[in-house]
Image (tube, grey):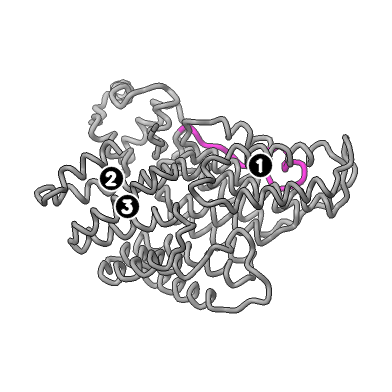
Amino acid sequence: MHDPIRHPLAYARELRRWSQGDLVAELNKAARRHGLLSGADKTAISRWEHRRKTPNADSQLLIAEAFDVPVSDLEAYGWPHWLPGRDEPLPLGAAHTVHALHDTRRAAMDRHSFMTFSAISLTGLAAQWAVARPEHLTSALTGKRVDGELVDWLEDTSGKLAALPTEQRQHTIRLMDAHLATVTDLIAEGRYGETTGRRLHRLAASLATTCGWHRFDQGRHWAAGKFWEAALQSAHAAGDRDHGAGVLSDFAYQATWLGEPKVSVDQLGHALHGVSHPTARSLLLLRRARAHAVPGDRSACYRDLSDAESALTVEAADPAPGWCAWMSPADLAVDSGQCLLDLGRAGDARARIAEGVALLPRARDKTRGIFLTYQARSCLKAGDVEQAQAVTGESLDLATRIGAPRCAALVRELAPAFKRYRRVDGVPEFLERLRVG
């Protein structure tokens, strides 16, 4: 299976069809034009692309020259977001909703893209969402009047597809894509009243969110972003503030995943202004706690963890919105443990993660696979290599069975931690399994 491109520099090279050696040659050319030596080699580029090191200011200027990027972009976007491959979201509003939905068809065909929205543009989109209100839906477009029974059927079928066990959903994503295409055509070409219009936009938001998560799990971050942009536009048009906040939190989760926790914190700050249900608030606070933990902001992380736990215990009169209905004590325990692990509290982290994995229902296998990698990481921190091998192997088996590249990528990222124990019986063979798995 093709490995996802997980750094913008690697994606920028792919756009030019450059190898790491080709990039070294281009940097040397740029340096010679200024009477300098670049000092770059393939090892340095590999470190940049694996986020082990950030190029200094002089190296970034040479990289920008090699890729024909204006120097002003370096200050505006920061490393690595000024590299080629940025995309800009459309402004919120009825005039752009159908455009955003149509863009998902192009994104669905993309198989090899890293590109994501820039941090600056994404923050701007979140701020716009926080203050904007949907325009009044028009009831007369070209084409036939949309039958309410058709919308009933689309909602029912979409709900059944989304409720399938994880192992089966990998085979139904094309049906979800087709449903989204149908809803998009109805929105663009049908005639309907305001109530039906809101239902169609709400359904489009739900489908686009699900389709975006499928791409995210495959490591196709640009495609995920395009689907989520369409989901945000559709939720905005439907007046569904809760779902819009959920989409912003998905963007935030992606930002943390890609090593941009500050972007995530900003996104979640906007999203929290748009939700009132305690389960939704608990999820958003938990995700923000994770973002605070990455750079080691202990006080902010602990505050959000405490607030997330308190919110999850509140009994609400209405059921939780569909986008966060799955949020449970298991999720709170595991992600709290992951926060503690990032903050250096390995022993406490291991106990919390084990507690959460035990609570998770079997129907959520994809989540279980990811949680198991967190558990393996905590075991390795504690020096329990045997248990780490056991849970990592279980996670890899799950990822293979349910077709979850994101989970498989997390498993493979554990290999450097296992290499420290290569003299332990069974570890060399296990490392080989991780390499070819």
Residue at 64% x, 76% y is: 316
Question: Label 2 near label 3: C-beta < 8 Å?
Answer: no
Image quarter where the C terminus lies is top left
Q: Is residue 433 left or right of residue 266?
A: left
Residue at 33% x, 67% y is: 354
- Vertical placement of 143 versus 119: above or below? above
The Cα atoms of the two marked residues, 1 and 2, are separated by 33 Å
The Cα atoms of the two marked residues, 1 and 3, are separated by 42 Å
User: For residue 240, which quarter of the picture?
Assistant: bottom right
Q: What is the magenta range?
A: 84-101
Residue at 46% x, 63% y is: 361
In x, y percent, where is residue 41? 23, 29
Residue holding disc 1:
90
What amino acid type is highlighted by mark number 1? Answer: Leu
First reached walking from the N terminus: tag 3 or tag 2: 2
From the viewer's side, name the closer residue of 41 and 106: 106
SS of the residue under disc 2: loop
First reached walking from the N terminus: tag 1 or tag 2: 2
Mark linked to residue 195: none
The Cα atoms of the two marked residues, 3 and 2, are separated by 28 Å
SS of the residue under disc 3: helix
In x, y percent, where is residue 357? 38, 64
Crowd around label 2: few <14 · some 14–19 · many ≥20 (10 Å):
few
Frontmost of labels 3 and 2 is 3
Residue holding disc 2:
52
Residue holding disc 3:
394
SS of the residue under disc 1: loop
User: For residue 58, which quarter of the picture?
Assistant: top left
Residue 408 makes an appearance in the image: yes
What amino acid type is highlighted by mark number 2? Answer: Arg
Residue 233 makes an appearance in the image: no
* Residue 428 part of the magenta-drawn span: no
